[in-house]
Image (cartoon, grey):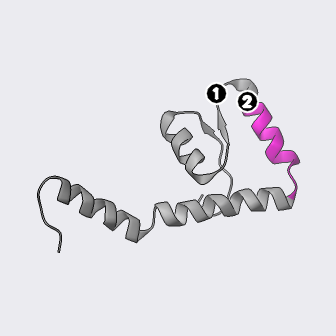
Amino acid sequence: WQLGMPVLAKATPVYQRVMDAAGVDMRCTSAREWAEQLERLIEGNATQLGDTGRKCRQYASAAYSKEEFMRRFDLAFTSIGFGVD
């Protein structure tokens, strides 16, 4: 996602949560869904694929930025009683 490329993934709870947050549906629960999703990627036009890639990249840039990492790190320490200055 950080490269702006669509990614197919098994429909685990974590991937479902992240893909829902990103606004994309590229998860697969069966061999049939894998085949359908791959077919969509193969047949997709450049505009559609570009739009999906941009959504993925925007989400990854925000959700996994240094600032977000530091915010979560601070929250973890605060939650166990350490003040963060």
**Disc 1 residue crowd, few under 14, some 14–19, many 20+, Cα 10 Å:** few
Q: Position of residue 9 (x, y in %)?
A: 61, 40
Q: Is residue 49 left or right of residue 66?
A: right
Q: Tell whether label 1 touches label 2 (CB within 8 Å).
A: yes
Q: Quadrant of the N terminus?
A: bottom right
Q: Residue at x 61, y 63 (%)?
A: 57
Task: Identify the residue position indicated by label 2 in the image.
Answer: 33
Q: Position of residue 40 (x, y in %)?
A: 82, 43
Q: Residue at x 39, y 65 (%)?
A: 68
Task: Give the numbered dot on residue 6.
Answer: none
**Disc 2 residue crowd, few under 14, some 14–19, many 20+, Cα 10 Å:** some
Q: Quadrant of the C terminus?
A: bottom left
Q: Residue at x 73, y 30 (%)?
A: 33
Q: Is residue 32 left or right of residue 80?
A: right
Q: How many marks?
A: 2
Query: Vertically, is 2 above or below 23?
Result: below
Q: Where on the picture, by quarter, is residue 38?
A: top right
Q: Is residue 2 visible?
A: no
Q: Where on the picture, by quarter, is residue 31?
A: top right
Task: Identify the residue position indicated by label 1 in the image.
Answer: 29
Q: Residue at x 84, y 61 (%)?
A: 47
Q: Position of residue 63 (x, y in %)?
A: 48, 60
Q: Is residue 6 left or right of residue 11?
A: right
22 part of magenta stretch: no
Q: Where on the picture, by quarter, is residue 51?
A: bottom right
39 part of magenta stretch: yes
Mark 1 residue element: loop
Q: CA distance from mark 2 to mark 1?
A: 6 Å
Mark 2 residue element: helix
The part of the chain drawn in magenta is 34-45
